Image (cartoon, rainbow, N blue to C red):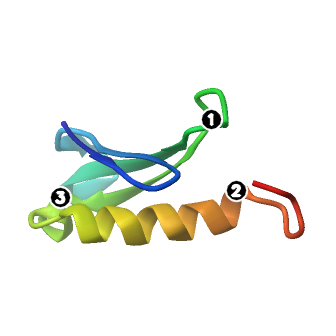
Amino acid sequence: MNTFSTKDGVVTLSKPYSTLMCDLQQIEVKYTPNNYHGWGICKSFNAIECSDFGQADAEVFALNAESKLRIKGEAA
């Protein structure tokens, strides 16, 4: 499992796992903001797509996830 710290939270990658619904192994990428008491947002990807996932990718994922978690006009 890989963990990346970002400006507003943490991005975590799970270990690759298999499912009955998909031929390829999957990885779950989860973003947990610092101030949401453990709540976050996650997305599953094919493991091969995340083989070179790095800090820059974590920053982009966190920024995108932040935009989904926050209500427009709400203070951070």
- Mark 1 highlights which residue? 39
Spatial CA span between label 3 and label 2: 25 Å
Q: Position of residue 55 (x, y in %)?
A: 23, 62
* Residue at left offset 34%, top offset 52%: 21
Q: How far apart are the two marked residues, 1 and 3, measured between alpha carbons?
A: 24 Å
How would you rate the neighbour count of disc 3 (Cα within 10 Å): few for under 14, some for 14-19, many for 20 or more? some
Percent across and percent down for residue 36 are 67, 36
Task: Report which quarter residue 69 is drawn in.
Answer: bottom right
Is there a contact, CB below 8 Å, between mark 2 and mark 1?
yes
- Left or right side of 28 for 36: right
- Say which of 27 and 68 sits in front: 68
Picture quadrant where residue 12 is located: top left
Dot 1 or dot 3, earlier in sequence = 1
Q: Secondary structure at mark 2?
A: helix
Q: Which residue is mark 2?
A: 69
Viewport quadrant of the C terminus: bottom right
Residue name at image x 84 percent, y 61 percent: 71
| Amino acid, disc 1 | Trp
Q: Is residue 5 above or below residue 34?
A: below
x and y percentages locating residue 43 in the rendered image = 45, 56
> Mark 3 is on which residue type?
Ala
Amino acid on which disc 2 is placed: Leu
Identify the residue at horizontal 67%, vertical 64% (top origin).
68
Between 48 and 12, the residue placed more toward the observer is 12
Q: Secondary structure at mark 1?
A: loop
Q: Earlier in the sequence, mark 2 or mark 1?
A: 1
Mark 2 → mark 1, Cα distance in angstroms:
10 Å
